[in-house]
Image (tube, helix red, strand yellow):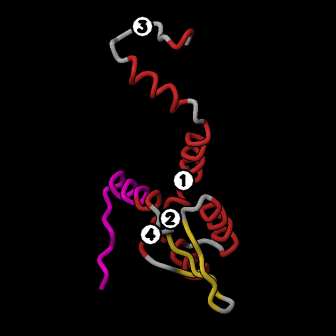
Amino acid sequence: MENGKLPHEHGTRAASERIKKELGNMEKFQLVADIFKQLGDTTRVRLFWLLCHCEECVINISAMLDMSSPAVSHHLRILRGSGLIVCRREGKEVYYQAADTQQSQLLHKMIEQVIEVTCPEET
């Protein structure tokens, strides 16, 4: 964009300048890409969705997903690194749940809308 001008002027110069400025903030877009990359795995989407509904230990998660504990731990580590889930330790047991953040809540809603599932009702 030479001299700040677009090749075609459509009467939206002010908006175009704001958009161009935001496009230059690569860190924001990289964060979004990293989160989507982590949720690009079916197991991690299932795991994240599960942890949006309950707090669980690795053993129970492994049983629910019919996976080995080391495999579940690997996926948990990735989700935890992204800030989508959190954990707490109680004795030797570690419990995981979705982080109470706007990003986690938004991704949870998006997953449910895309696959048209609803939160299980608590009894």
Q: Residues within 10 Å of mark 3 (few under 14, many from 20)?
A: few
Question: In whole angstroms, how far apart are the C-alphas of marks 2 and 3?
Answer: 44 Å
- Whether pointer 4 and pointer 2 mark residues with C-beta atoms closer than 8 Å, the reply is yes
Looking at the picture, which amino acid does disc 4 mark? Cys
Looking at the picture, which amino acid does disc 3 mark? His
**Residue 113 falls within the magenta-colored stretch:** yes
Looking at the picture, which amino acid does disc 2 mark? Phe
The mark total stands at 4
Question: In whole angstroms, how far apart are the C-alphas of marks 4 and 2?
Answer: 6 Å
- Whether pointer 2 and pointer 1 mark residues with C-beta atoms closer than 8 Å, the reply is yes
Q: What segment is highlighted magenta in the picture? A: 106-123
Looking at the picture, which amino acid does disc 1 mark? Leu
Residue with the mark numbered 1 = 39
Secondary element at tag 3: loop
Please give the label number shown on residue 52. Answer: 4
Q: Earlier in the sequence, mark 3 or mark 4?
A: 3
Q: Earlier in the sequence, mark 1 or mark 3?
A: 3
Give the label, 2 or 3, closer to the camera: 3
